[in-house]
């Protein structure tokens, strides 16, 4: 109850003792502020340093199953044969992505090499976990939250 709503970056900093940062991912609605290559590097760097989350815009309409104004955990990245995928989780455990690379999508059958690697990295399905292409991530998420965990 105490963490119902609020700012994800602040919550991560308070829970971990780390340093939090929030970044707008769009200059204007539908206009990403980072190139795919730049965002990929940023996500890799943030995941390597601590915790990462992403938020959907509150006024969004076409989110393909994502909840408007909601934060998702960014858990992992997967790059194989030109495809760049992001593993996310809805902390409520029930909202899920209905676009390309969702569980059961034909893209998995069309890319067996990627399917094998994704299963080796993460084999779970449901409970709010889903894969999404980086390009879809750029279009649908408006905020990036990360918390660098300090080690001594």
Image (spheres, rainbow, N blue to C red):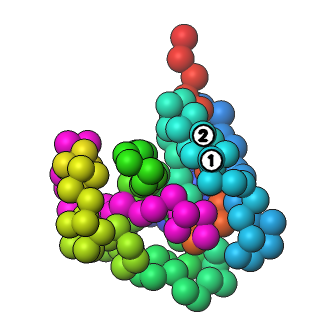
Q: Which residue is mark 1?
A: 37
Relative to 6, is 75 above or below?
above
Relative to 82, is 31 above or below?
below
Quarter that holds the N terminus:
bottom left
Dot 1: element:
helix
Q: CA distance from mark 2 to mark 1?
A: 6 Å
Quarter that holds the C terminus:
top right
Return the x and y of residue 21 as percentages of the image width and height.
69, 44
Q: Range of the magenta residues?
A: 120-139
Residues under numbered marks 2 and 1 in contact, where contact means CB atoms less than 8 Å apart: yes
Return the x and y of residue 12 as percentages of the image width and height.
55, 44
Q: Which residue is mark 2?
A: 41
**Residue at 60% across, 40% down:** 41
Quadrant of the image occupied by residue 54: bottom right
Residue at the extreme right of the image, as rendered? 27
Residue at the extreme bottom of the image, as rendered? 61
Q: Is residue 5 part of the magenta span, yes or no?
A: no
**Foreground tag (2 vs 1):** 1
Q: Is residue 126 part of the magenta span, yes or no?
A: yes
Q: Is residue 12 visible?
A: no
Dot 2: element:
helix
Q: Is residue 105 visible?
A: yes
Q: Is residue 37 left or right of residue 95?
A: right
Return the x and y of residue 23 as percentages of the image width and height.
72, 52
Q: Is residue 123 left or right of residue 11?
A: left
Return the x and y of residue 67 as percentages of the image width and height.
49, 78
The residue carrying pointer 1 sits among few (fewer than 14), some (14 to 19) or many (20 or more) residues within 10 Å by Cα, namely few
**Residue at 42% across, 81% down:** 65
**Residue at 62% across, 41% down:** 42
Q: Is residue 119 left or right of residue 150?
A: left
Quadrant of the image occupied by residue 59: bottom right
């Amino acid at each position: 109850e105490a963490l119902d709503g609020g700012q994800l970056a602040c919550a991560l900093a308070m829970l971990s003792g780390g340093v939090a940062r929030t970044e707008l991912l769009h200059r204007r609605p539908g206009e990403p502020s980072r190139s795919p290559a730049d965002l990929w590097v940023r996500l890799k760097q943030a995941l390597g340093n601590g915790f990462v989350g992403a938020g959907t815009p509150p006024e969004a309409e076409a989110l393909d199953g994502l909840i408007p104004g909601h934060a998702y955990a960014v858990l992992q990245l997967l790059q194989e044969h030109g495809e760049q995928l992001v593993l996310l989780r809805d902390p409520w455990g029930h909202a899920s992505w209905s676009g390309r690379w969702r569980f059961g999508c034909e893209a998995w059958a069309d890319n067996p090499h990627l399917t094998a690697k994704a299963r080796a990295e993460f084999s779970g399905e449901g409970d709010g976990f889903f894969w999404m292409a980086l390009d879809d991530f750029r279009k649908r998420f408006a905020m990036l939250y990360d918390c660098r965990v300090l080690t001594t």
